[in-house]
Image (tube, helix red, strand yellow):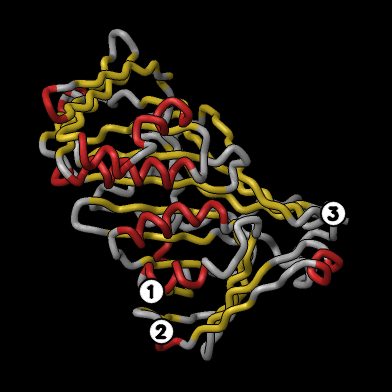
Amino acid sequence: MKCVIEGNGVKVFGKAVHALSRIGDEIWLDPLEKGLAVRTVSSSQSACACFSFTPLFFQQYIPDPDIQKGCEAVKCKLNMKCVLPLFRCASWRERSVDRCEITINIPNSRVIFQFHCRHGTTKIYNLGYQECEALHAVFPAHLCPNVLMAQSKLLGDIVVHFPVSQEEVTLCISSFKVTLKSFCEEENNCIKGMNTELMLHPDEFDCFQVGEDSAVTFCLKELRGLLSFAESYGLPVSSQFGVAGQPVSFTVKDMTLEAHVVLSTLTDPNLESPSQPAPGGVDEQILALVKHNSTLAVRIKVVFDLSLQTSSFEVRSSKAEEPKEQMWAPSPCQKQKTQTALTPASRKQPPVQ
């Protein structure tokens, strides 16, 4: 695979790497026929993100020849600490770098970054990679009852009121208003610390669709990177979510790129029903993670512990027999999308008396 980025595209690609570094410690380069997908998963496996760049984003994009033969392209996993310094100072790169070439050398297992700078200077970085599957969450955002879309500047002005140390926030939505407030796991911390709560009118959103009143709690730190990226280029941000305990998705779209961030949410311990486990039990929700054209099904299992009020992705990989209904899902950069419903948690049935 070889791609060439010129001009302002180098700065855009660098900001995308910065946004991904807010989430995970590893980065995947997934060259596809319809563009380059750059992915990451958080170390706690509670969030995943993907930036998909179409061929129009690059001055030149040559995918892996194996793709044209119907084979799978190599998927490279790199250490984020090795890639981030190459794009750390985006403003300096914009002033001094004319062109950036990214090449995957399969025989040597190397990813080569070449920065063609002004005055004839060329900087070459050879990074070793590990070949592995590029994981991505298959999240049916079109099935979510609640949809919000707002300008990135509005969201940036909202987030700036929360301190950097604030880890989680709660988003409440109803037919009359949207509330974003600080989340405290213990009541004593809420009394001692500073609490922030902002209320917005539906008219402030470009798209306001409420199918069900809900309140979801997610990690704000993992979202700051996407908001900063969208605000830099004035792109609107859309959000799709349901009730507490279900994932929340944030999307940024443009003609040449598309970014998705899927975050796990905390369950509501106050909502107990006979079908739910008792406090201290585990409520499970499965998000499928698959790899293209293979019988190896990789699934992400979102586990919500009601006693600890935490959530995380548990990555499982197993060789499975061919199911009757395949759940293969293309990458977000592909135009054709497979509609896949969330798989409910499996629960043991009581024995028949």
Mark sitting on residue 204: 2
Badge 1 or badge 2: first in the primary sequence: 1
Q: Of all residues shown, which one is farthest toward the top?
A: 108
- Disc 3 residue type? Gly
Please name the residue shown 75% across and 52% down the image. 305
Query: Of circles 2 and 3, which is in front?
Result: 2
Q: Give the image location of residue 250, x and y in percent.
A: 43, 60
Q: What's the distance in space between the residues labelled 1 and 2, CA to CA?
A: 7 Å
Query: Of circles 3 and 1, which is in front?
Result: 1
Mark sitting on residue 280: 3
Please name the residue shown 60% across and 66% down the image. 162
Please name the residue shown 84% across and 54% down the image. 280
Provide the secondary structure element on which disc 1 rests: strand
Q: What's the distance in space between the residues labelled 2 and 3, CA to CA?
A: 40 Å
Whether tag 1 and tag 2 are in contact, CB under 8 A, the answer is yes
| Quadrant where the image shows the C terminus | bottom right
Mark sitting on residue 150: 1
Provide the secondary structure element on which disc 3 rests: loop
Image-quadrant location for residue 232: bottom left
Whether tag 3 and tag 1 are in contact, CB under 8 A, the answer is no
Provide the secondary structure element on which disc 2 rests: helix
Q: What's the distance in space between the residues labelled 3 and 1, CA to CA?
A: 38 Å
Q: Give the image location of residue 79, x and y in percent.
A: 47, 26
Give 3 or 228, whichever is nearer the viewer.
Answer: 228
| Quadrant where the image shows the N terminus | top left
- How many residues crowd around disc 1 within 10 Å: few (fewer than 14), some, or many (20 or more)? some
Q: Is residue 175 above or below residue 120?
A: below
Q: Give the image location of residue 193, x and y in percent.
A: 77, 67
- Disc 1 residue type? Ala
Badge 2 or badge 3: first in the primary sequence: 2
Q: Of all residues shown, which one is farthest toward the front?
A: 119
